[in-house]
Image: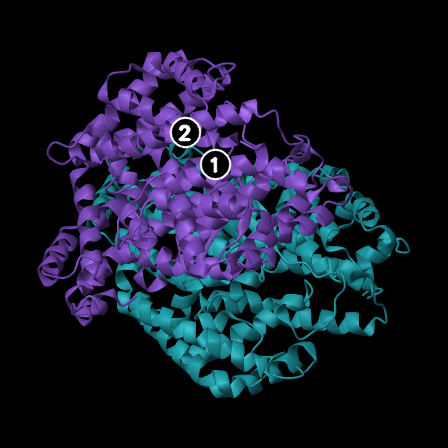
Chain colours: A cyan, B purple
Amino acid sequence: MRRGAESGTPSGAMSDALKPLIEGLREAATLNSVLFALEWDEQTQMPPGGAEHRANQKALLARLTHEKATAPALGEALARAEAAVTGFAPDADDAVIVRQARRAYDRAVKLPGSLVEETARVTAHAHHAWVDARKHADAARFAPWLARVIDLCQQKARCLGAEGQSAYDTLVDEYEPGATTAELNEVFGTLKAPLVALVAKVGASGRAPRRDLMTRAFAVEVQERVGRIAAEKLGYDFARGRLDVSVHPFSITLGPGDSRITTRYHANRFGDSFFGVLHETGHALYEQGLLPEHFGTGLGEAASLGLHESQSRLWENLVGRSRPFWAHFWPIVRDAFGATLADVREEEFLFAANDIRPSPIRVEADEVTYNLHILLRFEIEQALISGDLKPHDVDAAWNDKLRALLGITPRDAAEGCLQDVHWSGASFGYFPTYTLGNLYGAQLFEAARRDLGDGLDVDFARGDFSALRGWLRKHVHAHGQRYLAKDLVTRVSGKPFSADAFLRHVNSKAETWFGV
Amino acid sequence: MRRGAESGTPSGAMSDALKPLIEGLREAATLNSVLFALEWDEQTQMPPGGAEHRANQKALLARLTHEKATAPALGEALARAEAAVTGFAPDADDAVIVRQARRAYDRAVKLPGSLVEETARVTAHAHHAWVDARKHADAARFAPWLARVIDLCQQKARCLGAEGQSAYDTLVDEYEPGATTAELNEVFGTLKAPLVALVAKVGASGRAPRRDLMTRAFAVEVQERVGRIAAEKLGYDFARGRLDVSVHPFSITLGPGDSRITTRYHANRFGDSFFGVLHETGHALYEQGLLPEHFGTGLGEAASLGLHESQSRLWENLVGRSRPFWAHFWPIVRDAFGATLADVREEEFLFAANDIRPSPIRVEADEVTYNLHILLRFEIEQALISGDLKPHDVDAAWNDKLRALLGITPRDAAEGCLQDVHWSGASFGYFPTYTLGNLYGAQLFEAARRDLGDGLDVDFARGDFSALRGWLRKHVHAHGQRYLAKDLVTRVSGKPFSADAFLRHVNSKAETWFGV
C-alpha cells in the first residue's frame, strides 16, 4: 500500500501538504459515520416510539455533515492539496486522496440544500405511496409519485452533470463512478441474448432439482448458528462486527473496526438466511479489508456499488454455491438440522442451490435470471429519465419486457413494477450496479483462480477461505478508490472488462446441472 | 401543565418571544441525544473493534454540542426571552424555560473548552489507573491520579462558582441544583446516629433471614422473563424502550419516546437482576413521564439526580420489597423458577429481600446501610475538595469511618476506597444524590399514600401500579425542572423536606422483620 513510492512520487509529502484536507475529510466522515450508527440502531433495535425523534436526529446530522463537507475552509485546503500533487501519478496515494476529495466536494457544493431537502421530503411521501400502491397492487396510485421523483432526479442530474453528459449518465455515475450508459448498454447487450437462450435451454432440459429441499422446517436458532459459522469461516471478524436481524438484510459500517451485517429468518426457508449471510459477509469483508488508516479519504472507501456487489456475489454465488464449498459445509448443515435434511443427499441439495428458473421477483431470482430482471429495469429507467416512457405506462412496459426476457407474466403490479423500493427513494441508476457486481465478481474470481491455482478448491473443501480472502484484500479491498471499478477489474485480471467470465460461469453451471 | 395560565401570566406569549430560544435549545439537545444513542450502543452492542472510532465520534459530537450550547445567537435569543418573561411567576412555563436555559448557557460558557478537554483526557487515564489499582488492591497507585482529578474539580468549581460559594457547593450544585453542603450536612446529620443505632439493634436482635434463598440456581432466561414482566406491570412502556444486558446496569434516554434500560444476570443471583430491573424501571418511568413536547427545555428534563434516584429507589425498595408487591409477584416468581424456590415460603423470601446487614460494598448494601456508605463518601469528598484530606490518606480515612459507621473493616482497598468508579471520572458531589434519592422517595411515597389511600396496597397485590404511577407522573415527572427537587418534595408532601419519612420507613421495616 505504498503506491506513491512505487510510482516514484514523493509519498512522504502527504502528511504535510494534505494534512488540513485530510483532517477536514475525516471530520466530515466521522460525523457521517454517526448517521450510520443511528441507521443501524433504527433498523435493528429502536423501539417504535423512537421513530419521530430519530428522524430529527438524522436530519440534523445530515445538515451538519453537509456543512462540513462544503465548508469553504475545506475547499481551500483542497485547492492547496491539488497544487501539491501536480504531476503525481494518478494512482499515487496523494493523487487519489485529492481526486476523490474534489469529486465529493464538487458534488456536495453543486447540489443545492433545497433540492436535497425537497428530495428527502418527497421520497418520504413516495415511500408511503409505494407501500400503499404495492399493498393494493395498483400501479396507478404510485405513478404520480414516480413522476415527481423522476423530476427531482432530472433536476439533480442538471446540477451535477458535466457539459453534454446525459441525465442518466449523471445518475449512474453517482453509484458507479466512470460508468456510462453507452458502455453499460454495450456490455449488458452481450449478456442479454445468451442469457435468454440459456434460460430457455434449461427450461427445455426436462431436469429440475427437488424443490422442496429449501422449504422444510428449518429451526431459526439453527439457521442463525449455521450462518454465524459460515460468516466466521469466510473470515468475517466478529470482533469488528456483529450479526443481527432486520426486516431487510443489509451490511453497514459504523466506522473503522465496526462493520455489521444483518439477515432475516423464516422458519421454512433456509436458503434465504444462509445465502443472505454469505452475501452480506461478502460486503462486510470488503469493508473490513479497507485500510483503517485511510478512513475518511478515497483510499479508505469502496470504489463503487458495483465493485461492492461483486464481493457479495462472489462469496454468495461463486464460492457459496460451489461443490468444494459444500464439501465442507454439507455435513455441518445436514447435522445441524437433524431430521430435516436426513433424507437428502449432498448432490440433491447442491442442485437445489443451483437451480435456474424464471420467477417474477428479483430478490428471489437465481444467479442467472437475476440479470434479466436488472436488464429490464435498466431499460425502463433510461426511458423514464429521458422522458420516452411515461410513469403511468411503466406497468405495461414492465410486463411486456418480462414476457420477452423470461417468458412469464406477473400476477399483478405488486409482483411486477411495484416490487422494488428503489424508485420511491429516487435511486435511479442504482439497479445496473447489481449486474455489474455479477460480472466484476466472475472476472475477479477467474483471476483469483489463475493466481491461486487448483489448491483453492482443496482449501474450500477444508473450510479454509483465507487464500481467496487475502487475494481479494490485496488486489481489491486495500485499494479503496485508487482505480475506477472497471479499471481495477481489467488491471487485476489482465483482460478488458466484459461479460465473458460470467457467461463462462453460468454456461458451465447449466451444463453441470441441466446438461445443456 | 398550563401553569403559566394558572399563575395568571400570559402563557400564550411563549410561542413567539421564546421561539428562537427554544429552537436553539432543541437543536443542541437533539445533537446531545445522539451522544446517548452512541453511548447505549457502546455499552450494549458495539464490537470491541469499534472502540477507537467510537471515541472519535463522541469527542466530535461533544465539541459540536458545546458549540451549539454556547452559540452567541443562542445567548442573544436567551437575553430577548429574559426580557419577555420579566414579572412572570417563577413557576410559569416560560419563566422555567428561560431560567433553566440561563443556567445551562452560563455554565457552558463559563467552562473553558481547554478544561473540558483536559478533564476528558485525565479521566480517561485515571479510569485505567483506577482499574489497575483496584485489581492490585493498591490505593497508592491511584492516589496521584486522584490528586490530579481533584485539582481539575477545584478548577471547575472556580470557573462555575458564584461569589463566596465553596468549591464543594459548586460541585454538588451540578448534580443537585440548589443543594448546599450546609443543608446536606444538616439533613444527613439527622440520619447518621439513628441509622448507626438501628443497624446495631438489628445486629443484636438475633434474627436473620435464610440467606441462601437469593443465591440458588436461577436460570438466566427465567430471570430475564420475570424482569420483563415486572417492568411491564410497573408501567414501563416497551414500545418506547427496551431492556438489554450491560456490564453496569443503567437507564438512558435517546430522545422522547426512546428510554432504554439494562441489567445484568448472574446464574446464581436473582435479586441483583430483579431489583436492578425495578430500579432502572423507576428511572425510566420518570423519563417516560416527562412531556415530549418540552424536549430540549427545562420543562422536559429531570429536576436533579436526587429526584431521579428517588424514583428508582421508590419502585425498587418502597414498592418492590413490600408485602403487597410480593402478594402479586411471589406466585409468579416461585412458579417461574420451578424447583429452585419450591421449598421456600413467601414470608421467608420477603424477609431475605428486606435483610439489614453491614457489608463493605456500596452497590451490594441493603436499603438501610447503603446510606452510611454514602455519608462516608460525602464526608471524605468534602475533606478532599477543601484540601483537609490528602489523596494518599483516603485509604486510612475510609477504613476508620467504615468501622465507626458499620463496625466492619474492608479486606483490602479494592473492597474499600477503590470500589467505586465515580472519583476516577471526576464525579465529585454525585454521591450525596443517592441518599437524597432515598429521602425524597420516602417522603413522596408517604404523600402518595396519603393522597391515594389504603386502596394502594390492594392495587399492588393485584399487580396494578397505575394509580401510583399516575400520581408520580402528575406530581413529579410532568413538572420537569419547574421546581428545585427539595421544593417539589416539600410542595407535594406539604411538609419541609427532611429525613423523617425515611426513618419512619426503615424503623417500621426493622420492627417488622427484626422485632426492634
Image quadrant where one finds the N terminus of chain B: bottom left
Q: What x and y, as percent, mark residue A487?
A: 48, 51
- Chain holding disc 2: B
Q: How crowded is mark 2: few (under 14 residues within 10 Å), some or many (20 or more)?
A: few
Locate residue B384 relative to residue A426 in the image: left or right: left
Say which residue appears at 33% left-offset and 22% top-offset: B380
> In this picture, is B334 found above or below A352?
above
Q: How crowded is mark 1: few (under 14 residues within 10 Å), some or many (20 or more)?
A: some
Q: What x and y, as percent, mark residue B212?
A: 68, 30
> In this picture, is A354 found above or below A225?
below
Q: Along the line of sight, which residue is nearer the eye, A56 or A305?
A: A56
Q: Mark 1 points at which residue?
A: B507
> In this picture, is A394 found above or below B292?
below
Q: Name the residue under label 2.
A: B194
Residue type at the position of mark 1? Asn
Q: What x and y, as percent, mark residue B370?
A: 46, 31
Say which residue appears at 57% left-offset and 26% top-offset: B205
Locate residue B399 relative to residue B217 in the image: left or right: left
How much space separates mark 2 and mark 1, taking CA atoms?
Answer: 9 Å
Q: Can residue B150 be seen in this view?
A: yes
Residue type at the position of mark 2? Pro
Q: Along the line of sight, which residue is nearer the eye, A291 or A476?
A: A291
Q: What x and y, as percent, mark residue B89?
A: 16, 60
Q: Upstream in the sequence, badge 2 or badge 1?
A: 2
- Chain holding disc 1: B
- Confirm or deny contact between disc 2 and disc 1 (CB under 8 A): yes
Same chain assignment for discs 2 and 1: yes
